[in-house]
Amino acid sequence: MTTTTPTEAMPHPILTPIIVASCVCTRASTKETPAATQRNATTLLVMEYFTSILAAFCLVTLFLSQYSLLDAKGWFAVVVSFCGLIYVQRQDVRRAREQEGAEIEKKLHDFQKTRQERKEMTEWWTKEKARVYSNGGSDPTGEIFIKYTSLFDLTASIADRGILDELTSKNEEIMRLRQENGLKLKELYEKLNIEMTYNSNAMEGNRISRSETAMILSGLIGGEGKTLRELEDIVGHAKAFQKVQDLVATKKSAATISIRDILNIHELVLQNHSAGGKYRGEEEFVTVGNRKVLLAMPDEIEALMTKLVTWIRERQDTDYHPLLLATTVHYAFQRIHPFLDGNGLTARLLSNLILMRRGYPPIIIPVEKTETYLGALAAWDGGDPAPLVTFMTDLLKQMFSLYEKELR
């Protein structure tokens, strides 16, 4: 008697791709990525409906294939896979909606906090202005503001003369290296342009990365997803730094810095902006971050800038160290705040112009040190220049090390 062995049910040909596809989709849905948690509500709703339709299609396919040679395990795998897919996708929707709700709540909280801080700042500014300017207005000569801020009396200083002598001696070594390595120096300045442009703009909130900055300055396409203003700020700063280098090459003395030089630098910084190269007009209430600081009134700016340039010239032929001069001018310019925008960028370029004309390397403030930098400026607001002096001294020493590394 012949014994017949039952034929094993073979999986339907459509089963394998369905299971594989469902497993892949399920795996992809469980990955925690920024894209997964930041999808907008409309996209998530579409995904939800698509998943339901896909599941329904699977069930219809199974129904039409009920007489196919599929074993119980095969059907079970299909059902479980798609049930898992539906569950995971719905969980993804829930998490994303929770994330969206949390972000909206945070934005609302930040808005309310900013509005409250703005209110407090406005109240403080109004009282402070009334206290300083008893006549209710301002002083076109700038004398009241100078007395109030000790603008040209409280200056950068280092008690230990040995530190200044060390900086001077180190710079003489760097100058010799520069003379011996002209080609390397040119390459170094190209790197410095990228670093300075990236860091200085990043401090002001520009989102363009260091690599994108390099691409833009090389004439390549870069900065995708960024605003036109951000792109213009990168190009503008690079042009402004080139202007600084041109001024260094044509005018060897820091005493020749003029108002026109400063306005030209600022105009390049704010490329294609109507405020470029122009002093603030009627904008009295301007702020610098969260610092409670009273800046110069618009009708004082012209006189104060003239005094600043004169003050620089008077110290050109003295033993006042270039680093101290650059640091004091850096703060004084920021405190006057002559422009509606671009003051920080211009202040950093101006201080580098002073250093470079005296044969020193330019200083680059890393964006990672923004808080330290702003804290040092705030300390000077309170009458203590030491933190900014120390900060700038350390940065200059770092530039010496960079020059040695690149030019040797």
Image (cartoon, grey):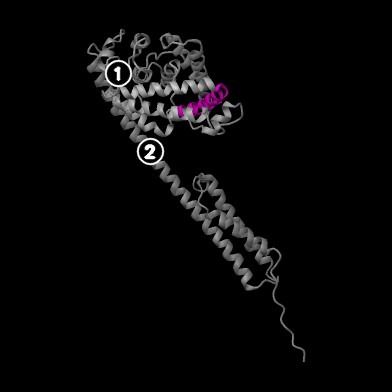
Quadrant of the drawing holding the N terminus:
bottom right
Residue 251 versus residue 368 in the image, above or below: above
Residue 48 versus residue 385 in the image, above or below: below
Residue 171 marker: none
Q: Secondary structure at mark 1?
A: loop
Q: Which contiguous range is marked in magenta? A: 181-200
Q: The residue under label 2 is which amino acid type?
A: Leu
Which one is nearer the viewer's eye here, 134 or 407? 407
Q: Secondary structure at mark 2?
A: helix
Q: Residue at x 42, y 30 (%)?
A: 398
Q: Residues within 10 Å of mark 2 (few under 14, many from 20)?
A: few
**For residue 183: magenta?**
yes
- From the image, tell me which residue sits under label 1: 155
- Rounded to the nearest whole Å, what is the CA distance between mark 2 and mark 1? 42 Å
Residue 55 versus residue 230 in the image, above or below: below
Residue 86: x %, y % from top left: 55, 58
- From the image, tell me which residue sits under label 2: 108
